[in-house]
Amino acid sequence: MTFRTRFAPSPTGPLHLGHAYSALLAHDMARAAGGEFLLRMEDTDLDRCRPDWEAQIVDDLTWLGLRWDGPIHRQSDKIAAYNAQLEPLAGRDLLYPCSCSRADIRAALSAPQEGVAFAVYPGTCRHRAMADRRPGDALRLNLAAALDALGTPPHFTETGPGHAGTHQIDRTMALAQIGDVVLSRKGEDIVAYFLASAFDDADQGISHVIRGEDLFDFTPVQVILQRLFGLPTPLYHHHRLIRDENGKRLAKRDDARAISKYRADGATPPDIRRMVGL
Ligand code: GLU
């Protein structure tokens, strides 16, 4: 198997130290294995992604000494293709239209669901048929029906330091912790990041997904989608996060740690490698 991995930033802000670590690690692991390193722009969020952020990310990665195999893949070029992929799921009764606002969802969740780690959709629109889809509705996966359709619960293999091993996706936990995720956003025909990313990992023949620990919780959803679409499941490697001096994970708005800022202050690529512990 060719070792092929990717760095998949969303161009919604500058490349900061955390992204640089992710890109350098994925690149180094691919090169050490004699494999390939691809660059993908996850830019389906047309409101937040900007071409100038993309240009800055490309410039920073190049400055860091990274070279990628093949052209940059842009998700915004493929939105119609992703949406077309949803049709078979609708045909299998695994999707439903949803008109709930974030506020509706919060209200429905407030009392009975206290203690749940993140907002699991309460299923308000689950009874609705696809034929009732109105303009502006989102599309949700009926997770219980999807797991029934799969039969054997899927699993994935993780090689990262935090969760190394085989992870069986438990039905009860999936229903309690993931729920009916949105696959296509409200109003626009834009697919959710984790769906586009699952299609692209398959399309681009990604053997190893190397990314931050913060995305570990999305993996079960992606693996369920891979099985539903008959796509292969890559190996996963979720790496440690680069944190600030207070232990907080760096965020896009954390401009103080933008690579462009370090560059302006005279840092060199080896300095950046040292700062992230590589
Ligand atoms: N686009 C995602 C991000 O910037 C990364 C997704 C992935 O690596 O699977 O957080």
Image (spheres, rainbow, N blue to C red):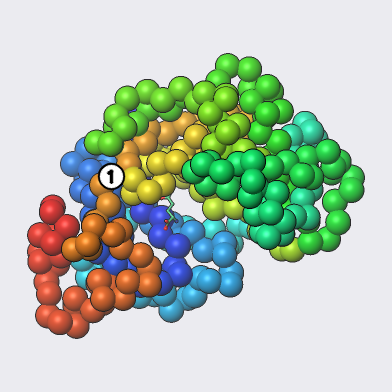
Q: Residue at x 57, y 25 (%)?
A: 172
Name the residue tied to disc 1: 239
Q: Nearer the viewer, residue 84 or 151?
A: 151
Q: Nearer the viewer, residue 67 or 233?
A: 233
| Residue positioned most to the front | 111
Q: Amino acid at mark 1?
A: His
| Residue positioned most to the bottom | 264
**Where is 162 relative to 40, above or below?**
above
Which quadrant: the N terminus?
Answer: top left
Locate residue 24, reporting x and y percent. 23, 55
Disc 1, SS: strand
| Residue positioned most to the right | 131
Left or right position of 101 against 271: right
Q: Residue at x 86, y 41 (%)?
A: 129
Q: Residue at x 57, y 62 (%)?
A: 44
The 10 Å Cα crowd at callout 1, few under 14, some 14 to 19, many 20 or more, is many
Locate residue 189, reporting x and y percent. 71, 59
